[in-house]
Image (cartoon, helix red, strand yellow):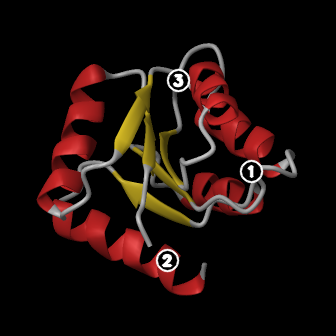
């Protein structure tokens, strides 16, 4: 399966870290968004996106709100979503899982961890 990632983070540096990690893992197809609203616009405009990696804490529309919006839209409801965040406390993880993210990565992370999480999501997708 040819994956096209949407990387959503308000930090340009973090988007670069994620995109470089993806490149190192052999994935070269991705677009970026700076917040949840921009991400929804890109999803609406591009049917070929089939994996979302999103930050939690963002202005305009948070990662959690983005996940709920993606899950609430029949066109995107089955998209694999990986949430990347500094929030590692159990309550937050539960909240993310209840919003139906497929997996969860706590910053800082290595490309290896990112790879494992992506593989886990794809294994059940």
Q: Residue at x 16, y 45 (%)?
A: 20
Judging by the rendered image, the residue that carries numbered circle 1 is 76
**Who's the residue at 70% across and 54% down the image?**
95
- Check the picture and name the quadrant holding the C terminus: bottom right
- Residue depicted at x 36% and y 42%: 30
Q: Position of residue 14 (x, y in %)?
A: 27, 33
69 vs 105: above or below: above
Label 1 element class: loop
User: Is mark 1 in CB contact (under 8 Å) with mark 2?
Assistant: no
User: Quadrant of the rendered structure where residue 60 is?
Assistant: top right
Q: Quadrant of residue 97?
A: bottom right
Q: Where is mark 2, residue-wise? A: 122
Q: Which residue, given by chain and number where applicable, does mark 3 sit on?
A: 58
Which of pointers 3 and 2 indicates the residue nearer the eye? 2
Question: Considering depth in this image, is 65 or 48 the residue closer to the camera?
Answer: 48
Q: Quadrant of the N terminus?
A: bottom left
In primary-sequence order, the first of circles 1 and 2 is 1
Horizontal and vertical percent position of residue 40 = 66, 29
Note whether 13 is above or below 18 in the view shown. Answer: above
Q: Earlier in the sequence, mark 3 or mark 2?
A: 3
Q: Is residue 35 left or right of residue 45?
A: left
Q: Choose the circle earlier in sequence order: 1 or 3.
A: 3
């Amino acid at each position: 399966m040819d994956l096209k990632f949407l990387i959503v983070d308000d930090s340009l540096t973090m988007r670069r870290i994620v995109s470089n990690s993806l490149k190192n893992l052999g994935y070269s197809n991705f677009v970026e968004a700076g917040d949840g609203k921009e991400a929804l616009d890109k999803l609406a405009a591009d049917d070929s996106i089939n994996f979302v990696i999103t930050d939690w804490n963002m202005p305009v529309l948070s990662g959690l709100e983005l996940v709920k919006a993606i899950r609430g839209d029949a066109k995107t409801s089955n998209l694999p979503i990986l949430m990347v965040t500094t929030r590692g406390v159990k309550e937050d993880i539960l909240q993310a899982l209840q919003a139906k993210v497929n997996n969860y990565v706590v910053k800082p992370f290595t490309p290896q961890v990112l790879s494992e999480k992506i593989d886990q999501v794809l294994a059940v997708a």
